[in-house]
Image (cartoon, grey):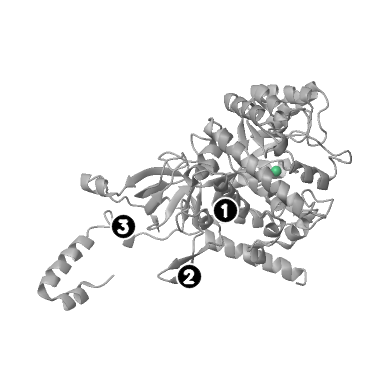
């Protein structure tokens, strides 16, 4: 800020009077102009209050951007949003609220924290330890404030992490625990299925992840889950059940996509070659790429309508199959250079013993089938939402070349590719995911009274979803290329985390791990 004297010196007496009145104006106590008096937030520390100034806000409910506004956070809640647009200014309602700490969001966009609707908390890959912080920090740096964990190997550890995250003891998104129903010992009778649901409820699961079980068990499990108030995420494989069972039994969400085209097959079974073996992952993923083309279009619409009527949501995880349609793209993602942990790097390499590492002899023909598979899949998704269906977004990272956090942003890009307006894409990852979790009354929105889970983005994600990538984007400004973008602040439960700082920590973690391996 210039001093009054220097302004007066350059502008003469008239200027001096103007400058003095500006000075008087500036001398109004910090209540009115708190910018000079408040502090920047400390990454990882919740202040009593925080104001995000001058933000353009994209809410998580499918409405367009609006602003500027000041968002006031007290503790872990959004206390109020004060609009500063010209109409509000003229009406005199645009007072500037005060707070202990402040983020200047001029020219930036504020969104609800992203919810990763299909995630895996992993502290090892292929039996080799991987620091949990690596994944949690990547998620936060990507703007993720909640994850729906579907299928942990160690339920007790995950529940402990959920508690530590809720108490703010660890830099981590909120964790929602969807326990694996079929984890050994897998229930074999309907009575055992009911007992298993009760057991998971007792342990403290938020929901159930199911898959690979026969119809009688699925029926008992879903009935019991409804009674106990547990939501169910269904990864339908090629199995006895398909989307019609989810419709009949009222599954909360179908994960990925299996079970949906299967329910629309004319002859009830895909045209597999005689040599096909479901346990062979090369076979399984190769022929999954030839499934959507076999779905009867008319039958498929009936399935989608059935899902809408029964409130079965769809969590497509488009990103996790992308290597099947473009292997080279998947293997050469630019962020791998600095952010791919050597443990994960090893896991991604083709190996029949690692789930999803099936790229042996992957051909141009396989990719061509998968490209067509995506086109039909994406059209079905689009049609599903048009008919009233609820679509979420999740990264399923830690498998098939998808990196935690980055994978979710890629997922959003693929939703745009499927034809959704970026406003709807943001809604998929925020408001819709909150509904799928049953948390829509406190998460997924930028709204007074909601939890303070917000992200401050250095750019406009409605113009370019890539600005959400933690590594940012290159932009042309005044004829010069500049690095911009990225989630600058991820605020979870009122605790602000600085995105670039988290990313630098991850980079160091990866560097040290590689050095330890003599690379
Ligand atoms: Zn998964």
Mark 3 secondary-structure assignment: helix
Residue 338 vs 54, above or below: the answer is below
Quarter of the image with the N terminus is: bottom left
- Residue tagged by mark 1? 140
Q: Which of 406 and 445 lies nearest the eye of the viewer?
A: 406
Q: CA distance from mark 3 to mark 2?
A: 34 Å
Disc assigned to residue 34: 3
Question: Which is nearer the N-term, disc 1 or disc 3?
Answer: 3
Give the Cα separation between the discs numbered 1 and 3. Answer: 28 Å
Q: Nearer the viewer, residue 301 or 29?
A: 301
In the rendered view, tell whether residue 389 sits above or below residue 506: above
Residue 481: image tag = 2
Q: Residues within 10 Å of mark 3 (few under 14, many from 20)?
A: some
Q: Position of residue 208 (x, y in %)?
A: 69, 33
Determine whether, in the image, residue 271 is placed left or right of residue 198.
Answer: right
- Going from the N terminus, do you reach mark 3 or mark 2 first? 3
Label 2 sits on a secondary structure element that is strand
On the image, the x and y values in percent for residue 138 come to: 61, 56
Quadrant for ligand 1 reads: top right
């Amino acid at each position: 800020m210039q001093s009054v004297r220097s302004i007066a010196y350059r502008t003469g007496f008239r200027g001096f009077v103007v400058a003095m009145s500006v000075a008087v104006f500036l001398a109004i106590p910090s209540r009115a102009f708190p910018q000079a008096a408040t502090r920047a937030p400390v990454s990882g520390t919740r202040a009593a209050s925080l104001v995000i100034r001058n933000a353009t806000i994209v809410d998580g409910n499918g409405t367009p951007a609006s602003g500027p506004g000041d968002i006031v956070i007290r503790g872990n809640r959004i206390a109020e949003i004060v609009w500063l647009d010209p109409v509000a200014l003229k009406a005199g309602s645009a007072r500037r609220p005060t707070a202990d700490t402040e983020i200047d969001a001029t020219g930036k966009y504020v969104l609800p924290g992203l919810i990763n609707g299909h995630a895996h908390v992993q502290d090892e890959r292929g039996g080799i330890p991987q620091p949990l912080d690596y994944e949690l920090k990547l998620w936060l740096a990507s703007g993720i404030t909640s994850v729906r964990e579907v299928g942990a190997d160690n339920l007790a550890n995950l529940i402990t992490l959920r508690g530590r995250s809720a108490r703010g003891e660890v830099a981590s998104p909120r964790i929602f625990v969807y326990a694996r129903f079929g984890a050994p010992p897998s229930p074999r009778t309907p009575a055992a299925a009911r007992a298993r649901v009760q057991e998971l409820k007792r342990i403290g699961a938020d929901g159930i992840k199911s898959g690979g079980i026969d119809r009688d068990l699925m029926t008992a499990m879903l009935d019991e889950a409804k009674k106990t108030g547990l939501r169910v995420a269904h990864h339908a494989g090629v199995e006895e059940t398909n989307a019609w069972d989810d419709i009949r039994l009222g599954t909360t969400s179908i994960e990925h996509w299996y079970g949906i085209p299967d329910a629309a097959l004319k002859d009830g079974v895909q045209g597999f070659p005689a040599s096909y073996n479901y346990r062979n992952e090369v076979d399984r993923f190769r022929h999954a790429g030839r499934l959507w083309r076999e779905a009867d279009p008319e039958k498929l619409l009936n399935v989608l309508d059935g899902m809408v009527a029964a409130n079965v949501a769809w969590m497509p995880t488009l990103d996790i199959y992308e290597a099947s349609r473009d292997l080279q793209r998947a293997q050469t993602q630019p962020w791998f250079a600095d952010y791919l942990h050597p443990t994960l790097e090893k896991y991604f390499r083709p190996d029949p013993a690692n789930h999803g590492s099936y790229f042996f002899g992957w051909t141009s023909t396989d990719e061509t089938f998968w490209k067509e598979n995506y086109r039909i899949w994406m059209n079905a998704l689009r049609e599903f939402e048009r008919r009233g269906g609820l679509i979420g977004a999740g990264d399923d990272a830690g498998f098939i070349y998808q990196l935690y956090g980055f994978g979710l942003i890629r997922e959003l890009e693929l939703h745009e590719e499927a034809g959704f307006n970026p406003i709807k894409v943001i809604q998929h990852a925020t408001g819709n995911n909150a509904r799928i979790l049953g948390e829509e009354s406190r998460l997924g929105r930028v709204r007074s009274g909601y939890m303070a889970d917000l992200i401050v983005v250095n750019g406009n994600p409605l113009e370019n979803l890539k600005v959400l990538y933690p590594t940012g984007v290159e932009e042309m400004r005044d004829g010069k290329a500049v690095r911009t973008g990225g989630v600058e602040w991820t605020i979870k439960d009122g605790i602000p985390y600085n995105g670039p700082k988290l990313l630098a920590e991850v980079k160091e973690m990866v560097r040290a791990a590689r050095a330890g391996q003599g690379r």
